[in-house]
Image (cartoon, grey):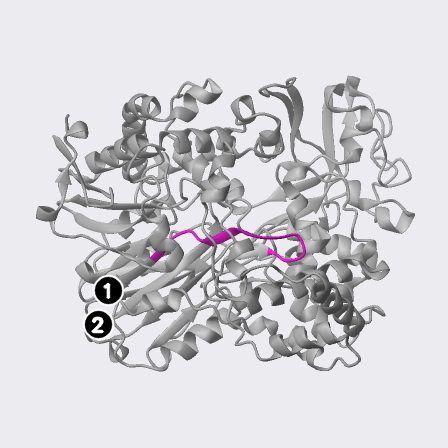
Amino acid sequence: MTVEIYRDAWGVPHLRAGDARELARAQGLATAHDRAWQLEVERHRARGTSAAFLGPDALGWDRFARQARLDDTARRCFTALERRDPETAAWVRAYVDGVNQGLPEGARRAPEFTAVGLAPGRWEPWTPLGVWLATHVLFAGFPGKLWREEVVRHLGPDAVGLFATDGPGTSGSNGWLVTGERTATGGPVVAGDPHRYIEAPGVYQQIRLSCPEFDVIGLAVPGVPGIAHFGHTGTVAWAITNAMADYQDLYRERLRRTGDGGRVGDGVGAGGRVEALGPDGVWHPVSRHTEIIEVADGDPVEVEVIETDRGPVVINGDVINRGTDPYGDGGGGDTDSGSGDNADGGSGRDRGGDVSTAPLSLRHPPRVTEDLGFSALLPLLRARRVADVDRAFDDWAEPVNVVQAADTEGGLLHRVAGRVPVRSEDNRTRIVNAWEPGHEWRGWYAPMPRGTVDDGIAVMANQRGPATPLGVEFAPPHRATRLRALLGTRRDWSAADMAALHMDTHLASAAPLLDLLAALDGLTPEAASLRDRLLHWNRHMTADSTEAATYAAVRGAVVRRLAAHPALARLTEPPLYPEVFRPWLALVPRVAFALESLLRAEELYGIDRAEAVRAAVEEVAGDPPKGTWGDTHRLAPWRALPDPSYDEREPGLSGDHDCVLCTSAVPGLTDRAARGPAARYVWDVARRENSLWVVPFGTSGVPDSPHHRDQLPLWARGDLVPVVTDWTKLMEDSTWRTER
């Protein structure tokens, strides 16, 4: 059977095959050709083996991947998929066959393999599931519960709400749907942009998949078959945003060693059996083994992998690693202690112990259900109407998303999709004790909530909306409010008009700081002049604005002063959690992203916020920024192999964390933007050929390819690339034409 691969002027692969399975093989083949290095990095990250060629900097992730049992979960989910949905399992296998066929040639073209001495490995049938899981396991932000515990421990429960905002590790998106009553064509438009850490190559791959069953344009996740998040089949288009749901739980465990293993704190090499205290007051055997992580330019590291009835232990804690007893009374028990001194299930906190050092297990849906939602992928490609998309997303598992869709017959969809467990409120907000009854999962939330389309508009930007019953913390409403206001000004929107909305830079969250600034008196002449400039500023974070740069400098100085105040200083030193969780525990980013609520709170632990703003303004007035916002607010993408030569090549950016153009820096630490739109898309439902898209870099991960960075200038200035649907306007890539 013939597989054909075509390219448009931007190198986007357009794939055509005789059936869905051959098409999946072609997708794997084309992806390996374009993204071999990226694919192998993701495969190794899913297995927890990336430090073997990336070195010690990757060790923290590898340790987490091993302890969270990501690869084992992917294997289990694929085995279950073969049993429940053999057609999809065979389709995934075909994709993997294509990857394995294309990797040798793809690796030959990618200089990174030679740089680190890595040979391409073999993909297994479950590898795409592992890539999906590794990409999204931190997406719901369960480490935020570690932060809340620290806030409660040091400041009390009332302080949690002060910091409740879109945290530094949470990814979001803008998404909007406009019905035909507000468009020039009379057909709907679906548009938006996913906000993620910007990676090079990008986390989304522009692609077209065509066979007799379907012909779909969309954004794929490299390493995963099909088009999951953003797609257009010609008659129906869909897109997702992060629902900000809470569906992962952390349990504080009590563990002890038995047999010849000695006490609990004897370390990872102690051996013996491990038991965990359950909510029934009984010590239950747990799964336990050790693994070796190879580290380039370093010694191998042994890691202990433990899984209780709740889930894998992702933080071993001092109770396992350092020979200490976090309960303060021998609660871990020794080999002869029977049920242990703490078998009554009492709280270590009550006995004066530091429960922050206890082992923590993670419970999340794929580990419980052996289902990653891959059964939704083929039905999405085959969808013809909104009802088809709706049914497909009934099988969605994670991450939990808000879905918007529209079709050519007037069908509309606005719903939440995914799997959220029913459990106690404490599970949703805090770390809970595994040995206490009442924290078990009791089925799944159903039916999933649905949103509305009001006056021809539906907007989701991670704010409180249909997913409110499922979440704890949501993004501030500014992006959603701004988008709805802009969309409401017209009834003749075209696909091309949407590019301006993607690039809107109004910063509504600046209000509380500017209000405090306006109330100041007694400033030095230099500071008073600076204040007056900011009060007349239009509050747009444009790259060419000196006022935006000045505002950012004052904001950063305020953040640093608040974080340094003795009232918050107790949160400066996080507990000894693994480094992979530290972005959620750093005080300065937490203050930065919660600044609006911290400045507006009725009282803030005795902190004089007006004086903090006064000192910040005087500081910046004495050493004002030398240029514009874009001079310091520059793109800072993640690369598996850092290349300093790229630093000066990355563009200056407009936008900010709470702008529609969400290019997110960390005020108080850096103006560089590590997060932002990982793609932009506009799906014209009535005329697919009028659809538009762009990614931050290009279609190819190969440095010497003309399509390695060719979309970056367009992405930076807000332009979009046309979606090509006419096969006669494409060029055949004869190198990859295959017969099978």
Residue flagged by tag 2: what amino acid is it? Gly
Q: Secondary structure at mark 1?
A: strand
| Residue 211 found in image quarter | top left
Residue 601 vs 729, above or below: the answer is below
Which quadrant would the N terminus be assigned to in this image? top left
Residue in the picture at 38% in, 69% down: 501
Q: Quadrant of the C terminus?
A: top left
Residue 676 falls within the magenta-colored stretch:
yes
Indicate which disc residue 187 carries.
2
Residue 444, visible in the rendered structure: no
Per the picture, the main secondary structure of the magenta-coloured stretch is: strand
Of the pair 641 and 653, the residue shown nearer to us: 653
Asked if 712 appears above or below 680 in the picture, the reply is above
Q: Amino acid at mark 1?
A: Asp
Percent x, y for residue 446?
Answer: 47, 61
Residue 103 in which image quadrant? top left
In the figure, residue 610 lies in which quadrant?
Answer: bottom right
Q: Residues within 10 Å of mark 2 (few under 14, many from 20)?
A: many
Q: Which mark is on residue 684?
A: 1
| CB within 8 Å, label 2 to label 1 | yes
Query: Mark 1 Cα within 10 Å, few/some/many (few <14, many 20+)?
Result: many
Residue range (magenta): 666-680
Q: Where does residue 487 sit, x and y in percent of width and height?
A: 37, 76
Labels in figure, total: 2
As helix, strand or loop, the secondary structure at mark 2 comes to loop
